[in-house]
Image (cartoon, helix red, strand yellow):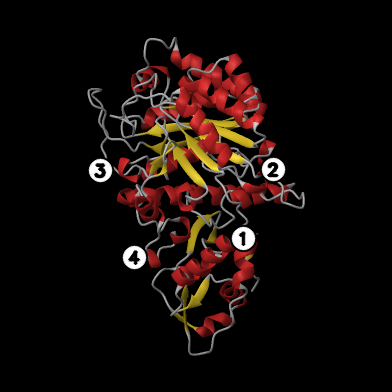
Amino acid sequence: MSTPTILYPGDPRVCVLLGNQKTPSADVRIRPCHFVIHHYIDCKYLLFHTLTRRAVLIEPTLITYFMAGKTFSAEILENETLQELYKQYFLVPEDCEESQLYKDIKEILRFKEEVPEGISNYVILPTTACNARCFYCFEQGIRPNTMTRETEEELLNFMIGHRPAKNFPIAIQWFGGEPLIGAGMIDRLSQGLKDAGIQFEASMISNGSLFTKELINRAYDLWNLKNVQITLDGLEEEYLRRKKYLASVKDPFQTVLSNIHALLQADIRVVMRLNLDANNIGELYECVNFISNEFSDPNERNLLFVYTHEIFGKSCGNCGETIESEIDLTVYVDQLNSYIQQKGLMNHFAKLFENNDYLESGGSKKDKDGQKMHPFTTNGGRLKSTYCMADRAEHSIVIDAEGRFFTCEAMVDEFCYGNLKDGITDAETFEKICSTVDLPELCQTCAYLPECTDFRHCPNQPKMPICKMSQQRRLGQALLNLYQFEQEASHD
C-alpha cells in the first residue's frame, strides 16, 4: 500500500525536535493522537496535526484509525501507511501525554527564538471617539477621549526608550475609536519614529470613512501603513442603519467604497470584514455579490481579502438593536466564508488580518536564504510559540488615548497595569495577567490546544466556545486553501 500523500511536511522546528516516533513493542495499544483533525475533501481525508503542522491525504478506508476513542493493537502498523503515520505522530501509544509534548515543545521554541529586548509590537489608540455609532461596538460606554500633545510626547519618548535591540523593526496597529480622528497624532508620531531612526510598519482598524487622497498618500509614505481592516455589514441601506454615522460624514457608503479603491490602488492591503448576525445573513450574500462586481480589477483583488465573522456585541443602549446571543451562527459563518472563497475574494496568498508575517507583495514571503516560502508556512504551517500579544507582554503593549498600559486590546479596566507618566504601577496585576495555568483536564485532550492560550487571566476565557469555534474556522479555511493550492500547483 502506498505511503500517505504529503500536502505539507510540517513545521521543521517541531518535526526536528520530535524526530520520528519509534516503533512500539507488540503489547502496546495504539490510538489516534489527540492533536489530529480531519476534513473530507474530494473523496479523501485530509489529516492535519495541530502540533507538528503536518498535513497528509489518506484513503477514506483508513479513517477508522483516526476516530476519537478507538484503540488498536500494534499489529496495525504492519500496514505501510499506518506505520508511516505512526512515525509522524498521527498515531501514538495509548499512554502518550500529548499535552506534555506540547508544553515541552512550546517552551523550547520560546527559549530558542531570538526576540531582542525592547517592545516590538504596539496597539495604539489615538482616540476613543468615533464618527459612527455601531450598535455592536465593544467600546460602548467608554468615555470619548483623544490623546493630548503631552501624552503624544510621552508616548514617543517611551517608544524611543523601549526601542528593540539591533534596530529590530516594530509593528504598530492603530486602533480606536476611529483612529483617523487622530490623524495628526499619527503624523507626528510616525515622523518622530523616523527621525529617531526606528524602523516600523503599521496596520489599522478603521471604518474607512475619513480617508482622503492626501491622507492615503501620507499613510503610504509617512505612516508605513501596510493594511487596513474595514467593516461592511450589508448593502447601502443596511450598512447606514447599522453604522449610524454622524451627520458630518457625507454619503458614507459610497465614500467608504471609494476610499477602499483608493487604498488598494495605493498598494495598501484592505481586509474587508462582514459582521454577521441572525438578522443580516441573506443581506450579506447580496453584499458579497456586490463586492465581487465592485472590485473586479485583478490588481485590486490581489490586495483585497474578504471574510465574515459573527458579531460579538449584544446590544447598544438606545439604538434599539439586540443580538440573539444564544443562536449558534457557526454553520452560517462557515457557509458564507465558503461562498466568499468561491467568488475569489479570499486570495490564497492574501495577508490574513491577524497574520503579521505576510509583508511581501502578493503574499510570497521569502525565508532567510531568499527562497520563496510556501504560502501555508505563514498561514497555519508554523506552530505559534505565542498565542497573541499578551503572551509576550515583555515585547507587546496596548496604550490607550490616556496613556494607560494594557496587555490586550480588550482593555478590561482591571487589566490596566501602568501608564506613560508613571510606568508600571501594578507589577502584581501584570504578573497575574501574563502567568500561565495548569491545563484543565478538558484542554489536555483537545485537538486545538496548540492553537490556544494558557493565560491565567484572558478576557476571552468566558467566551471559550466562541474562541474555539473561531480557531476551527480559521484553521479549516487555511487547510482548504492548502489543498486547493496543491491541486493548482500539480496542474501547472
For the residues labelled 3 and 4, the Cα–Cα distance comes to 25 Å
- Label drawn at residue 440: 4
How busy is the neighbourhood of tag 3: few (under 14 within 10 Å), some, or many (20 plus)?
few
Q: Amino acid at mark 4?
A: Pro
Which tag is nearer the camera, tag 4 or tag 2?
Answer: 4
Which quadrant of the structure image shows residue 56? bottom right
Which amino acid does the dot numbered 2 rest on? Ser
Q: Looking at the image, do the residues carrying marks 4 and 2 touch, with CB atoms under 8 Å apart?
A: no
On the image, the x and y values in percent for residue 222 come to 63, 25
N-terminal of the two: label 2 or label 3?
Answer: 3
**Badge 2: how crowded within 10 Å, few (<14), some, or many (20+)?**
some
Whether residue 355 sits left or right of residue 437 in the image: it is right
Whether residue 318 sits left or right of residue 205 in the image: it is: left
| Disc 3 and disc 1 in contact, CB within 8 angstroms | no
Q: Give the amino acid at mark 3.
A: Glu
Q: Disc 4 versus disc 2: distance between alpha carbons? A: 39 Å
Q: Tell me: residue 56, above or below residue 247.
A: below
Of the image marks 1 and 2, the number of the one nearer the N terminus: 1
* First in residue order: circle 3 vs circle 4: 3
Residue linked to disc 1 = 11
